[in-house]
Image: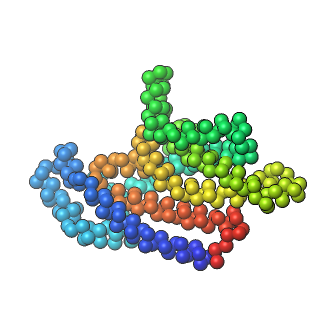
């Protein structure tokens, strides 16, 4: 197991090198740069822009800019924002806990709904409850998070003169107000993942419950709870974990939109702002950190397979 974990962690290194090249190249394919943005917003005159471009090194060849940037990243230095001149690491660390809170609440909502419903539907296939719950799952999958979030903001304001709280409050200052602020965006973001997880859990439970070892457990007279949770669910969860790992980029992408809609000062809203400003240093660091996060989570999920299913051995 230790050799497998080490091998997987080492494989992250070349993957991150490729990701860094793609991130660096694609960001600079966007028309205009930060200097053009400053000139268009009248931060600088056209003459001053030329001098600033040279100062920031934006006039250098692309491979020289990449070399400077990646050498700093290797040392743990992501540079400074081209707009605010603040350290990129400090800017990201200030907003990261808010995005992590939103992601954790979204995932918690999705799993609390999807797993019990998926287990129930798998144990009662084609029943009235199963058909209703499957329809709800399909509805969750079909509703776009950006549309639902926009409707939640607009319709209650028009009909009832009420809108969700939009002013950020720190969890350490007022936990209740903080959770009130995050609960609606978390539900909006978690609905799609809940619907997908619900459907897959049902499918896998149907398959596992037909296996010989489950029928043997029933024949031994084990209680229903022991058969379902100890024998069936653990083996049914492997594909579900795989799906969650694969959908993490989608969840992160949805967080970008949802945070912007609900005015949450997290990583998602920072992406939207820096993308409009062409702030290359922050954009590059954010994309690189998101890629590293997804890779590490997938390694953890792969390792968890052996814990859930003893038949899997990483030797």
Residue 77 visible? The answer is: no
> Residue visible at 81% across and 56% down?
215
Report whether 41 appears left or right of 260: left
> Residue visible at 74% across and 46% down?
123
Q: Position of residue 32 (x, y in %)?
A: 22, 53
Looking at the figure, which quarter contains the C terminus? bottom right
The relative height of residue 218 versus residue 315 in the rendered view (above or below) is: above
Q: Position of residue 208 (x, y in %)?
A: 72, 56
> Residue visible at 37% across and 50% down?
271
Q: Position of residue 195 (x, y in %)?
A: 58, 44
Residue 114 visible? The answer is: yes
> Residue visible at 54% across and 63% down?
298
Q: Position of residue 96 (x, y in %)?
A: 46, 53
Report whether 99 appears left or right of 47: right
Quadrant of res 75: bottom left
Q: Residue furthest left?
A: 47
Report whether 73 appears left or right of 313: left
The relative height of residue 277 versus residue 217 in the rendered view (above or below) is: above
Quadrant of res 304: bottom right
Looking at the figure, which quarter contains the N terminus? bottom right
Total numbered circles: 0
Quadrant of res 241: bottom right
Depth order, front residue of 59/77: 59
């Amino acid at each position: 197991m230790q050799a497998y974990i080490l091998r997987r962690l080492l494989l992250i290194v070349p993957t991150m090198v490729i990701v860094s090249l793609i991130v660096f190249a694609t960001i600079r394919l966007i028309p205009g740069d930060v200097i053009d943005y400053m000139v268009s917003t009248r931060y600088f005159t056209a003459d001053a822009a030329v001098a600033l471009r040279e100062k920031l090194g934006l006039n250098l060849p692309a491979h020289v800019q990449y070399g400077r940037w990646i050498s700093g990243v290797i040392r743990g230095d992501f540079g400074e924002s081209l707009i605010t001149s603040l350290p990129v690491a400090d800017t990201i660390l200030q907003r990261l806990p808010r995005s992590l809170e939103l992601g954790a609440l979204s995932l918690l909502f999705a799993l609390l709904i999807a797993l019990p419903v998926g287990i129930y539907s798998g144990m009662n296939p084609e029943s009235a409850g199963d058909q209703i719950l499957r329809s709800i799952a399909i509805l969750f999958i079909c509703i776009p998070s950006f549309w639902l979030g926009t409707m939640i903001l607009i319709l209650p304001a028009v009909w009832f003169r009420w809108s969700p709280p939009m002013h950020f409050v720190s969890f350490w200052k007022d936990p209740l107000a903080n959770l009130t602020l995050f609960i609606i965006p978390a539900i909006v973001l978690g609905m799609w993942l809940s619907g997908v997880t619900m459907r897959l859990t049902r499918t896998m439970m149907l398959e596992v419950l037909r296996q010989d070892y489950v029928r043997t457990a029933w024949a031994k007279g084990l209680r229903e709870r022991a058969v379902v949770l100890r024998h069936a669910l653990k083996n049914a969860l492997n594909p579900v974990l795989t799906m969650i790992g694969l959908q993490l980029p989608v969840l992160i992408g949805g967080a970008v939109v949802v945070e912007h809609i609900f005015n949450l000062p997290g990583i998602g809203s920072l992406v939207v702002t820096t993308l409009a400003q062409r702030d290359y240093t922050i954009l590059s660091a954010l994309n690189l950190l998101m890629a590293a996060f997804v890779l590490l989570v997938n390694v953890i999920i792969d390792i968890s397979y052996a814990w859930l299913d003893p038949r899997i051995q990483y030797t």
